[in-house]
Amino acid sequence: MSAAHPSPPAALPTRARLAVATGRTVAGASKLVHFGSGSVIGGRAALLVDPDLLRQLTRGREVVVVSATNGKTTTTRLIGAALGTDRPVVSNSLGANMTPGIVAALGAADPIATAVLEVDERWVPQVLEQTGAATVVLLNLSRDQLDRSQEVRKLAERWREALTATPPARVVANADDPLVVWAASAAPEVVWVATGQDWTADAAGCPNCTGRIAFEAGSWRCTACDLSRPDPHVEVGDTGVTLPSGPVALDLALPGRVNRVNAAFALAAATALGADAIAAAQAVGRVQEVAGRYRVATLAGRPVRLLLAKNPAGWHEAIDMLSPAPAPVVVAINARIADGHDPSWLWDVDYERLAGRLVVATGERRHDLAVRLRYAGVEHVTVAEVADAVARAAAAPGAEPGAIVDVAANYTAFQEYLDMVGGPR
Ligand SMILES: [Zn+2]
């Protein structure tokens, strides 16, 4: 079954064509002098030529916007796989998720391809206004990069205003995150997804009235106003997902409960856009890694699996994905600009759950991590270089000989190791 596509796009205006050409030239030059992939700098150059370029590149195009604090890169990738079963898809799937990265991806794309766009939480209003996206997928809001991001309630408020100002045809949203529910309720049609999210530390205050939110028995409600958990249309089970159209089996290559939830969002969005549920579920099931995450690679001559965990909510899910104790784990923490300079968020992670195994702490802020692990009562050592850290973990008493070592890293540490094992960026 194939969805009705929007009318074919009109040819781009001259200024937009010039902007795209400029972006390509700059991106190409940037690649030659080793500025990384060159896509973001090319996008910036293109936007200088035509600030309205995103609007031009999405005119007449089917657009899906995906945003969240955690899981947006993976969910974008899964929606791309699901929709790719019956139509061409373009995506900024490597995480360049602000307007320059988005126009760089679209400038090179088939003009009729559906755009599945990962969008930074703070850029949702601008991107919605310019693309008029018909489908918006909102996963969660949690604290991230504390020292440079707005507080999460402010973000929820901006989402809510954006959904009121530029109402999409549908929003697919998390019924278990009060901040997301409050924001998404501004949209005319919402497909609510039950995520069983049990990370509630970021949503204790009601976004509507600042009253107290009570969480109990898999549900929640505000004790002071009428904000409460909506009845979900989509539920995640052990072997499949129940969609508005009925149940569909799901067998995922990606690990962890959280990826079953991400897959449920992807299937809800794709089937709402006309994709066949069974074909979409099979395509989603075949995705093995996302921008290097979950990749099994060789580091320091040993097999490792790379996991990204960059904030307390992300860590909460990542711990479920680790090989069970007593298997050791390497944990790498940096505190550069992209990570946030303040590593105090380590105190909000439930590292107590790592007890019963050796944790090898590495990265530039390994000593901050070691202090946290000491208070958590978790056995640990600190090792400066990641290669030595992997070797130390592989030699730990709990390690099976030759077993894959889990390496869980926050943002810049993860990028560093991904480079070491050969990209992609
Ligand atoms: Zn309230």
Image (tube, rainbow, N blue to C red):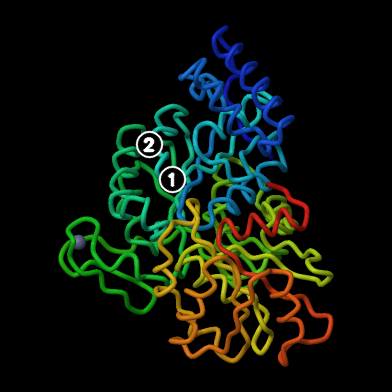
- The percent coordinates of residue 133 (x first, y second) are 47, 33
- The percent coordinates of residue 180 (x first, y second) are 36, 55
Look at the picture and state if 194 lies above or below 135: below
Name which residue lies at 58% across and 56% down: 412
Residue placed most toward the observer, 54 or 29 = 29
| Residue tagged 2 | 125
How would you rate the neighbour count of disc 1 (Cα within 10 Å): few for under 14, some for 14-19, many for 20 or more? many
Q: On the picture, is 401 further left or further right than 313?
A: right
Disc 2 secondary structure class: helix
Residue at the far front: name it. 384
Look at the picture and state if 131 lies above or below 368: above
Q: Earlier in the sequence, mark 1 or mark 2?
A: 2
| Res. 392 in view | yes
In this rendering, the count of numbered labels is 2
Q: For ligand 1, give the image quadrant.
A: bottom left
Disc 1 secondary structure class: strand
The quarter of the picture where the N terminus appears is top right
Residue placed most toward the observer, 33 or 50 = 33
| Residue tagged 1 | 171
Query: Quarter of the image holding residue 333?
Result: bottom right
Look at the picture and state if 101 lies above or below 10: below
Name which residue lies at 36% across and 35% down: 167
- The percent coordinates of residue 105 (x first, y second) are 63, 32
